[in-house]
Amino acid sequence: MASDTAIPPDDGRSGRLPPIPEDQLTEEQRRVAAGILSGPRGGLRGPFPAMLRSPEVADRFQKVGEYLRFNSSIPTALNELAILVTAREWSAQFEWYAHHLLAMKAGLPPAIAEAIAAGRRPEGMDADQRIIYEFATELHRTRFVSDATYAAVRDRFGERGVIDLIAVCGYYVAVAMTLNVAQVPLPPGVPEPLKPLPPS
């Protein structure tokens, strides 16, 4: 693995679980890192430098994430909408930063992301955006979804879509947990995108 693409350097801002220097990686860690680098992500960033401390977890986790990001039955912009809801619920700054970029690239309207960042229900959502927002928000806040919310997703995206949407919400909770516990920093010069929300 080339050092410029494998393990990001520890720039002194790397939080509690900084990237492991490449010359200190075990063979298992090297194998998992190579698997991540050879996939569609194209880099070892976000939660994965921290997760390499448990390479078996990192390996299994990244495979689930690869499916959910690149092969989910939920269309990309809507998938990113669910991830932004998750990032906001967990105040996961790096997760929001990374997936806001992906959401904009996928065509999610900026006003929707701005409202979610501010803790408001977005106005002007189309039918698909509304049912994804409602499902993800309800699931995070109540730990359940109503019959009406469930039926809306099932009828539009099928039972596979229901499971894929549950999975993306749950997976990105675990990503948010890892990023927050590891204190993964934003890139230099990038301000925190999420402001504290007032008590509900």
Image: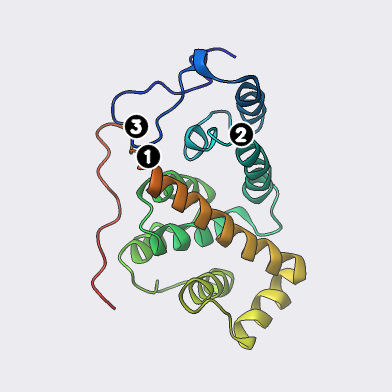
Identify which residue is drawn at 52% across, 53% down. Answer: 174
Q: Is residue 128 visible?
A: yes
Mark 1 sits on what residue?
Answer: 184
Badge 1 or badge 3: first in the primary sequence: 3
Residues at marks 1 and 3 touching, judged by CB atoms closer than 8 Å: yes
Q: Which of the 4 image quadrants contains residue 128? A: bottom right
Mark 2 sits on what residue?
Answer: 55
**Is residue 72 or residue 200 the one in the foreground?**
200
Q: Quadrant of the N terminus?
A: top right
x, y percent for residue 165: 63, 64
Q: How many marks?
A: 3
x, y percent for residue 119: 33, 69
Horizontal side of residue 99 vs 33, given as left or right: left
Mark 3 sits on what residue?
Answer: 14
Residues at marks 2 and 3 touching, judged by CB atoms closer than 8 Å: no
Decide: is 129 above or below 192: below
Q: Secondary structure at mark 2?
A: helix
